[in-house]
Amino acid sequence: MTVERFSGAELLIKALAELDVEYIFGYPGGSVLDIYDAIFRQDDVSHILVRHEQAATHMADGYTRATGRVGVVLATSGPGNTNCITGIATAYMDSIPMVVLAGQVASSLIGGDAFQETDIVGCSRPIVKHSFNCRSVAELPNVVAKAFYLAATGRPGPVVIELPKDILIPDNVAPYVMNKDVKIRSYNPNVKGHSKQIKKAVETIVKAERLVVYTGGGIIIADAAEQLTALVERLNAPCTNTLMGLGGISGLHDNFIGMLGMHGSAEANKAMANADVILALGARFDDRVTNKVEKFCPNAKIIHVDIDPTSISKTVNAHIPIVGLVDVVIGQLDKELDAVGHKASDNQFNIWWDEINEWRKLNSFSYETSSELIKPQQVIESVYKHTNGDAYVTSDVGQHQMFAAQYYPFKKPRQWINSGGLGTMGFGFPAAMGVKVAFPDSHVVCITGDGSIQMNIQELGTCLQYNIPVVIVSLNNRSLGMVRQWQDMIYGGRHSSSYMDSLPDFIKLAEAYGHVGMQVNHPDELDGAIEKAFAIKDRLVFVDVLVDENEHVYPMQMRFGAVDDMWLKKGVKV
Amino acid sequence: MRRIISILLENEPGALSRIVGLFSQRAFNIESLCVAETEEPSLSRITISTYGDDKVLEQITKQVNKLVDVIKVANLTERSHIEREILLIKVLAMNDKARTEVKRITDIFRGDIIDIGKQIYTVQLTGDDDKISAFIKILSNETEIIEVVRSGTVGIARGEKALRAN
Ligand SMILES: Cc1ncc(C[n+]2csc(CCOP(=O)(O)OP(=O)(O)O)c2C)c(N)n1
Ligand SMILES: [Mg+2]
């Protein structure tokens, strides 16, 4: 019996199907036409044609952040690939697993400046977890299996596979063989915390008087939210989340003291500054959290749990470093707490809670409403109300992003999706599309700004073609608000290029693409409009909300200060 | 402080560029870098000579280790080790005096004259960084140096300790 043989393009699609890939987000071109032909001739894997490759990467990314499954992107050689760079970098900074199938000119042409040749592996090297130059048809399925494995395990991240045209064409065939049980001798991702370190950590925790549990995106990625919540409850400790970690514990939980960092709550930043022990779980002491590193929590003993050893003691020195998968380590900590006879009823932190509750009274997220102008914070609260707090919320980058993080308490992990590490404007809308594709029956809302939305606005076309009815709520302040805020605070109010002159008519724009457009400009109309937007389930709704253009995001850490040196309001220091 | 880092990694296309890219991307220094296959053809061994304080070195080691192709990383300067570099140097040897001096200095340093042209000697010398630098300096006092090529440092731990895949 002869073994059936397939072209590289066919092998690729078979491999994706075997790995249960539902969607490819992509855009065709010369070098990948064989792959598009193979997609056309099967039903297992669907393709979504975006309008710009950057959007394909963010769509895959949003899909992944909501589902936990590896997102797949397909782009043609040259400009198709370079258009993916921002999305790859976005995924890399937030540790999002992604596989990018990058077309390439034929092997014989590589290096000769052929038409649409770019060294995509070289271009993307600093922003990928790993990459493959696939050079033979027969190895293709195994390369794909390895790429998925690397993308999803350990500290996840994007993986690029370069696919030269000659290994995809029909005249070059090989049998289909895939070994799903991937082993790579130089890569061992399943790490348990060192038992000595676990013991030390628990000794320190049970002796603590002012413990803070500080958690980041690692909790979300590891699906460890329930475990985290149980640990926090058992310790009856205050818990704060980073921008990436929101939803790790419910935003409504009594022990949650809000987001920390640059625009975090007063109680979160105060608690950090006054802690004697900080238990950091899947967070990386980013500069948007620490403020001036030299002044960061000088009196705290730091227990730092992370899967990536490079994250530990990179900015802030850890006293008790623990390298390991955060879900596994929480399990180990729990067992060790049992072993030392820790009881929840010990009320270890009573005095500490009294202090924290005093800081809570600062009410750092209070804001003044107006009878004439819509405040951006109000819009988020209205969105919360009309989605029962259950929507998937994606955001772009700017003031609106911070307002969304501050005023929409996320009850569950994966509900809040934003580009925290790279801060990519243009991320929110395509990311929302990726989420909606995965969860068509859920509310999916993109909170955006008049600047950011224009960075991937062309995807309104994709939404019509594939019927992806997300809700876009744009906090339209006629300016690059976050830039303007910094100019107000640091640059003497000189608004250099932070105004958005000549904004399009967003209603007409939405309508031109076949969607519903709405505009709101009075506080009295806000609730009704938002309610209506979410009641329309089968069409994309673009809600252009004209908000107060002078609103700033508060609280805000003072530049070069300690973690809790912050402006509560204009001119009011904490 | 100067450090010698040994890296054992997969002998695959792109592996070296990942290492070099990492050093430039993260602003780590490279003083010299040597790479070649090991006894096991699927593995390469890289020796990098770099400098930085303990914190920088810790990051370098961790970051290199994190690369998927890297199997092991060791900081040789941490314990007793042997370092060698090879130098090929061309010097002007126009007259008897210069020839005698070059020969004498080469002998003292236990180097070899490995090629002779009409007016030029080519000398080979092995040793650590210090010895090679001293040799070049002394030669330059006696005659004109035409060309210098240094291999960069390779190193290995003393005694039983070995850097192996498993
Ligand atoms: C691609 C990209 N370019 C520039 C920036 C810098 N930046 C950060 S916030 C911001 C303003 C965003 O304006 P808008 O989307 O209207 O949001 P607002 O702050 O007004 O809510 C800019 C330009 C960025 N984050 N991403
Ligand atoms: Mg704006």
Image: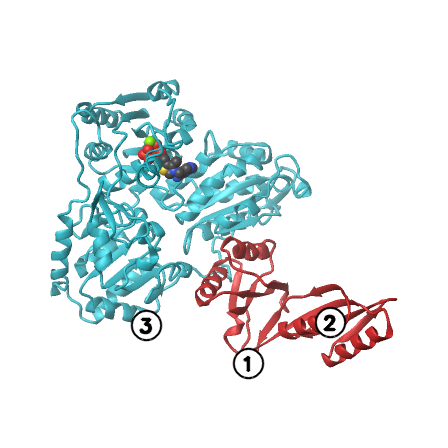
In this rendering, is residue A100 above or below A536? Answer: below
Return the residue at label 2: B141
Q: CA distance from mark 2 to mark 3?
A: 59 Å
Q: Position of residue A392 (x, y in %)?
A: 29, 38
Return the residue at label 1: B160
Chain B shade: red
| Disc 3 secondary structure class | helix
Q: Residues within 10 Å of mark 3 (few under 14, many from 20)?
A: few
Q: CA distance from mark 3 to mark 1?
A: 28 Å
Which chain letter matches label 3?
A
Q: Position of residue B125 (x, y in %)?
A: 72, 73
| Residue in the foreground of this view, choosing between A141 and A473 | A473
Q: Are marks 3 and 1 on the same chain?
A: no
Left or right of A499, for residue A251: left
| Disc 2 secondary structure class | helix
In this rendering, is residue A296 above or below A441? Answer: below
Which chain letter matches label 1?
B
> Are the two marked residues, 2 and 3, in contact with CB atoms closer than 8 angstroms?
no
Disc 3 residue type (three-letter): Lys
Return the residue at label 3: A196
> Are the two marked residues, 3 and 1, in contact with CB atoms closer than 8 angstroms?
no
Q: Residues within 10 Å of mark 2 (few under 14, many from 20)?
A: few
Q: Quadrant of residue A529?
A: top left
Q: CA distance from mark 1 to mark 2?
A: 42 Å
| Disc 1 secondary structure class | loop
Disc 2 residue type (three-letter): Asn
Of callouts 1 and 2, which one flags the residue occurring earlier in the amino acid sequence?
2
Q: Are marks 1 and 2 on the same chain?
A: yes
Disc 1 residue type (three-letter): Glu
Left or right of A527, for residue A23: right
Please identify, in this view, whether the residue under mark 2 or under mark 3 is nearer the observer.
2
Residue behind label 1 places its C-beta within 8 angstroms of ligand 1: no
